[in-house]
Image: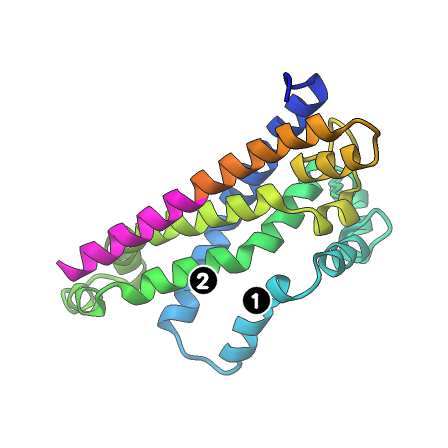
Amino acid sequence: MGTFTPEEVTAIALSLKIALVAAVASLPAGVACGWLLARRDFPGKALFDALLLLPLVMPPVVTGYVLLIALGNQGVIGSWLREHFGIQFAFRWTGAALACAVMGFPLMVRAIRLSIEATDRRLEAAAATLGAAPWRVFFTITLPLAWPGLVAGAVLAFAKALGEFGATITFVSNIPGETQTLSSAIYGLLQVPGGEAGIWRLTAVAFAISLLALLVSEWLVRRQRLGNER
């Protein structure tokens, strides 16, 4: 397959950066949504859950187009952010991270929700009976017990972000060194005669990283399950 070119190394590094930022930045919101779905009943809960899952069932290009319309340079929100705060997402790596976070968010929330639902609510009730405030119960009981699910959710979101293509290329295009990720680099090489060697190299890297992420996620889920059975 040969050695990696500087452009391929840049695409790999940028993909890891975007995937990591997407997973870490969306984790607080993922924890909040997962806890809300696991511990609270409220009007419209089914609709809220369905809206969170929408990115999984909608075509990624549609998600990217919605982001472009809303947060693009001429978008309703995007133009306001750029004018007042100098924040720009379209055609920037930060926009790629945002698109990846949106696409991976449902997987993260589902893993966190299942993890919180699997924790023993009697421990939370006991802490509350002893006078602990709800926020303290969450941070000292719920969160430590559910941490494998939190990490598993973040890992799944990272893996999803690493392979995202449709939403990112629609929202931020395929700019080498700025928004060109592993997936878009592979797509670009498909248009170049003799690009098969580069495609195989990048495919091998994507396969290895994604497989490792999934194995880590599965190990964490099994660890929590075994811990709950003891």
Residue at image location 14% in from the left, 65% down from the top? 130
Above/below status of 56 relative to 206:
below
User: Foreground: 161 or 99?
Assistant: 161
Above/below status of 177 relative to 40:
above
What range of the chain is rendered magenta?
Answer: 214-230
Q: Position of residue 201 (x, y in %)?
A: 63, 28
The main secondary structure of the magenta stretch is helix
Q: Position of residue 26 (x, y in %)?
A: 53, 49
Residue at image location 69% in from the left, 26% down from the top? 197
Residue at image location 46% in from the left, 51% down from the top? 28
Q: Which residue is mark 1?
A: 53
Q: Is residue 23 left or right of residue 3?
A: left
Amino acid type, residue under disc 2 in the picture: Arg
Q: Which mark is residue 130?
A: none
Q: Which residue is mark 2?
A: 110
Question: Visible in this render: residue 185?
Answer: yes
Question: Visible in this render: residue 16?
Answer: no
Which of marks 1 and 2 precedes in the sequence? 1
Q: Is residue 220 magenta?
A: yes
Residue farthest to the bottom?
Answer: 43
Q: Is residue 146 magenta?
A: no
Corner quadrant of residue 122: bottom left
Q: Position of residue 198 (x, y in %)?
A: 70, 27
Amino acid type, residue under disc 1 in the picture: Leu
Above/below status of 19 relative to 167:
above
